[in-house]
Image (cartoon, grey):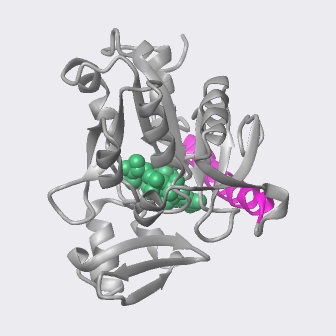
Amino acid sequence: MDVLGNYKSVIAARSTDRDILKKSQDGGIITTLFAYALEEGIIDGAIVAGPGDEPWKPEPMVATTKAELLAAAGTRYTISPNLALIKEATRSYGLDRVGIVGVPCQVQAVRKAQLYPIGLRDVDDKIALVLGIFCMENLSYQALEAIVEDHCNQKMESVRKMDIGKGKFTVYTERGAVSQMPLKLIHKYVQPGCHVCLDYVANLADISSGSVGSPDGWSTVFVRSTKGNTVWDGAIKAGLFETKPMDQVKPGLDTVKKLATDKITKNQKNVDARKTVGLKGDGTPKGLRNPYESP
Ligand code: FAD
Ligand code: SF4
């Protein structure tokens, strides 16, 4: 498979909704698509990374209104266990059509849950729209705190936005300060599982998106499934996005491909190394069957 996965189309896009663009991380693709899907009855709620008790610590939440989606817009560079809410979304919230956003490993987990719905009876067929966000690596909350407070010298509660791009981790504060550190310095903080992750662009999502490849404030969007195509076409017809062909934007698709190739090549080496010390690539000790594999 190509490092970018299967897709029907790829395009640079930006939301036409100013309120969304003020709160979103990049082109507001995820929030705009969920708002559209809610409005059209494609979903009746979306599991997103909402604000938690501590600053920048996400708490998965079920959003059923645009206001709730806006409260959860933007990126938190730490784990948000969105899948933990899937069962509750259908049972406690009574949703019949669930939307969910996740990083690539979470999107893979959703697809596995749909194929093998162990413990998720009557949930798998209620997953109506799966949106993915690109992900090179992720951090624990403690690591994020150390990066922001110790390396960037900013208090977590004073931060307005965090961003990764152009080789830097950047923190913007509410009072207008900007602190940066080279991305290579955060590698030591990365979650162990991320070192064997072979998906950069959420290959199994209906639609996946990230900033890389497109100009600042825009997003690169992969429309992957038939469902994704229908939703994307509808949103475009409704005038919800400005778009540009990928071959007319800089840095362009080659940069996405390069980063995906770099991630997969580096991490494949770690997978191979683990196999030599008695672990399967996924960390399961040899001789034990991974419950997700077919017998
Ligand atoms: P928005 O409209 O801002 O919506 C973002 C949605 O994602 C919201 O619904 C929000 O609740 C949800 N969300 C926020 N944080 C998380 C989280 N931690 N886990 C699950 N869901 C979350 N893009 C790149 O191009 N290259 C990268 O290398 C890259 N690395 C990333 C690493 C991490 C750990 C994360 C969380 C994201 C990364 N992204 C990367 C994605 C990028 O930061 C944006 O999230 C993406 O472009 C979507 O922006 P948007 O404006 O379309 O979305
Ligand atoms: Fe998940 Fe891979 Fe991102 Fe780590 S790098 S959070 S394993 S998608």
The picture quadrant where one finds residue 139 is bottom left
Query: Would you say 117 lies left or right of 8 here?
Result: left
Query: Would you say 252 lies left or right of 74 here?
Result: right
Asked if 110 appears above or below 186 in the picture, the reply is: above
| Place of residue 294 in the rendered image (x, y in percent of width and height, measured from the top left) | 55, 13
Q: Secondary structure of the magenta portion, mostly?
A: helix
The picture quadrant where one finds residue 90 is top left
The picture quadrant where one finds residue 154 is bottom left
Q: Quadrant of the C terminus?
A: top right
Q: Quick check: can you spot residue 194?
A: no
Pick the front one: 247 or 113 = 247
| Place of residue 89 in the rendered image (x, y in percent of width and height, measured from the top left) | 27, 26
Which residue is rendered at x = 32% and y = 59% of the image? 140
Q: Which residues are magenta?
A: 252-277
Q: Is residue 20 magenta?
A: no
Pick the front one: 85 or 216 = 216
Pick the front one: 182 or 34 = 34
Asked if 60 appears above or below 192 in the picture, the reply is: above
Which residue is rendered at x = 73% and y = 34% of the image? 6
| Place of residue 73 in the rendered image (x, y in percent of width and height, measured from the top left) | 38, 55
Which residue is rendered at x = 33% and y = 15% of the image? 120
Q: Is residue 269 magenta?
A: yes
Q: Quick check: can you spot residue 219?
A: yes
